[in-house]
């Protein structure tokens, strides 16, 4: 993986669940976004969503797979929008089956907020039909019309 | 392999345990699990624990961190204790608002205010 400061604007990354690997992938994508002058709030949204997407891929998608099984991250950072796709090698899931964590009855349940947060911060989230590939799109707040 | 260094700093003052985070990013699940275990030990060491968690240095957190805070809150309540959160950056506070966890936790502007609320 290249140094984050010299990261490309688009690339495919294979990330395993080993210490530091997810951080390095995040740093690389964030560095590309910073070069394209995305503001601090965008970087916050991007880092949070990347973390949630990759965590879900390992925790749920790869639950029954060795930790060395990689998740694939495809990213493309442009001036007006960022696209990130995270694909795991698990059986997939039905995103509509995830309960709303903000319901009074769910507030004290420790898990189940990742997808909800990604929906809140990204412009769009799209799963493939089998539910093991998530594509997220974030639009630059200064380029709403573009 | 030596034991991993704790990711929290702990201060004890006026019967209140104050915790702050070493890292700016509370994202990594292994670190978050370790933080949860460290704080759980602090809770279990007391009857009626009073705990203030400061987010003064924190710039990013994940849903796993929120989950650990909920677990900590539940643990404190089973021991008839009280939890306060403080010094939360506006962007992180927004995460609490989006998830409605600002309704679950008592959040204060500063550690001093949080400590006073426990008096």
Image (cartoon, helix red, strand yellow):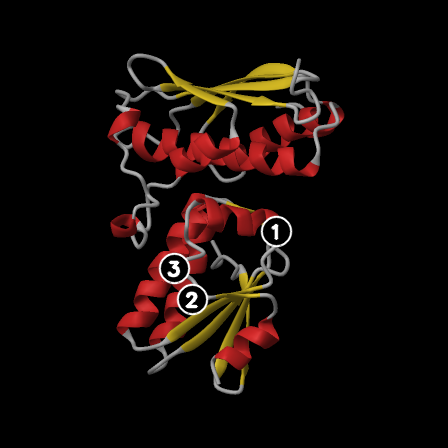
- Is residue A98 found left or right of B103 in the rendered image? left
Q: Position of residue A139 (x, y in %)?
A: 60, 22
Residue denoted by label 3: B104
Inter-mark Cα distance, 3 to 1: 17 Å
Taking depth in this image into account, of B112 and A65 the one nearest to the observer is B112
Residue denoted by label 2: B39
Q: Residue at x 52, y 37 (%)?
A: A48
Taking depth in this image into account, of B100 and B8 the one nearest to the observer is B100
- Is residue B40 found left or right of B18 in the rendered image? left
Residue B60 to residue A145: above or below: below
Task: Give yes or no for contact between labels 2 and 3 (Cβ–Cβ under 8 Å).
Answer: no
User: Where residue B90 is drawn, which disc sits there?
Assistant: 1
Q: Earlier in the sequence, mark 1 or mark 2?
A: 2
Residue B46 to residue B75: above or below: below
- Is residue B14 found left or right of A95 in the rendered image? right
Secondary element at image label 1? helix
Inter-mark Cα distance, 2 to 3: 19 Å
Which quadrant of the figure contains the C terminus of chain A? top right
Location of residue A111 by image quarter: top left
Visible in this render: residue A9?
yes
């Amino acid at each position: 993986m290249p140094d984050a400061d010299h990261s490309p604007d688009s690339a495919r990354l294979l990330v395993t669940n080993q210490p530091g690997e997810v951080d390095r992938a995040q740093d690389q994508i964030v560095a590309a976004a910073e070069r394209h002058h995305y503001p601090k709030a965008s970087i916050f949204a991007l880092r949070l969503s990347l973390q949630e997407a990759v965590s879900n891929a390992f925790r749920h998608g790869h639950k029954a797979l060795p930790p060395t099984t990689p998740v694939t991250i495809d990213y493309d950072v442009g001036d007006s929008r960022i696209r990130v796709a995270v694909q795991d090698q698990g059986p997939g899931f039905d995103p509509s089956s995830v309960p709303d964590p903000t319901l009074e009855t769910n507030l004290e349940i420790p898990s189940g907020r990742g997808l909800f947060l990604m929906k809140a911060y990204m412009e769009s989230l799209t799963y493939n039909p089998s539910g093991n590939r998530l594509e997220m799109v974030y639009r630059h707040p200064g380029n709403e019309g573009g | 392999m030596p034991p991993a260094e704790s990711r929290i700093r702990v201060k004890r003052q006026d019967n209140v345990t104050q915790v702050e985070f070493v890292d700016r990013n509370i994202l990594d699940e292994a670190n978050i699990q370790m933080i949860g275990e460290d704080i759980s030990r602090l809770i279990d060491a007391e009857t009626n624990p009073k705990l203030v968690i400061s987010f003064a240095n924190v710039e990013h957190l994940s849903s796993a961190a929120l989950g650990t805070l909920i677990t900590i809150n539940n643990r404190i309540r089973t021991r008839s204790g009280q939890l306060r959160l403080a010094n939360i950056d506006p962007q992180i506070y927004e995460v609490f608002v989006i998830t409605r966890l600002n309704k679950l936790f008592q959040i204060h502007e500063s550690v001093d205010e949080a400590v006073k609320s426990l008096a």
